[in-house]
Amino acid sequence: MNGPQIRAHVHFLPADAGGRKTDTPTDRFGCIMEISGKNLDVSLMVGETGPVAPGNTVEIDIQFLDWESARTVVDEGSAFTLRDFRRIGQGVVLKSYV
């Protein structure tokens, strides 16, 4: 699948709470999603929202690099943490597109 598999509500931690120091890139942002004990490579599709600044909360589409591994632990309502060398955000899965 070339498009996103889920939509999620994501809060990016502010820089003073350990989050990113700069905005996300303008198109895609790759990081690790920690969910149900698994670490999964994801791309946040930030093209729709534009760059996301630390401390902001957005609804965003997410694409998994390996959806077959992710589909067993990703359910609507599942909470997750985003990491980029450190914890940078947290979120909840709103819906699945697949």
Image: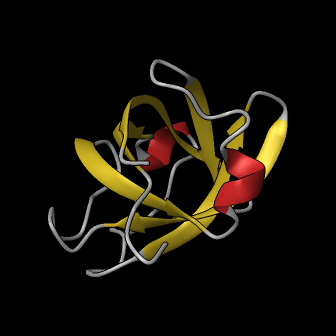
Residue at the farthest top position: 77
Q: Residue at x 55, y 27 (%)?
A: 75
Tell me the quarter of the picture where residue 3 sits.
bottom left
Q: Is residue 94 left or right of residue 16?
A: left
Colouring chosen for the image of the structure = secondary structure
Give 19 or 64, whichever is nearer the viewer.
64
Q: Residue at x 59, y 32 (%)?
A: 80
Q: Is residue 11 visible?
A: yes
Residue 92 x/y as whole percent? 44, 27
Q: Is residue 26 left or right of residue 75?
A: left
Q: Is residue 86 visible?
A: no
Please say if 37 is above or below 56: above
Residue at the farthest right position: 37
Please say if 63 is above or below 36: below
Tell me the quarter of the picture where residue 35 sits.
top right
Q: Is residue 70 left or right of residue 46?
A: right
Q: Residue at x 45, y 40 (%)?
A: 13
Please say if 47 is above or below 60: below
Residue 91 x/y as whole percent? 46, 32
Residue 38 x/y as whole percent? 82, 41
Q: Is residue 89 left or right of residue 23?
A: right
Q: Residue at x 45, y 24 (%)?
A: 76
Residue 98 x/y as whole percent? 44, 48
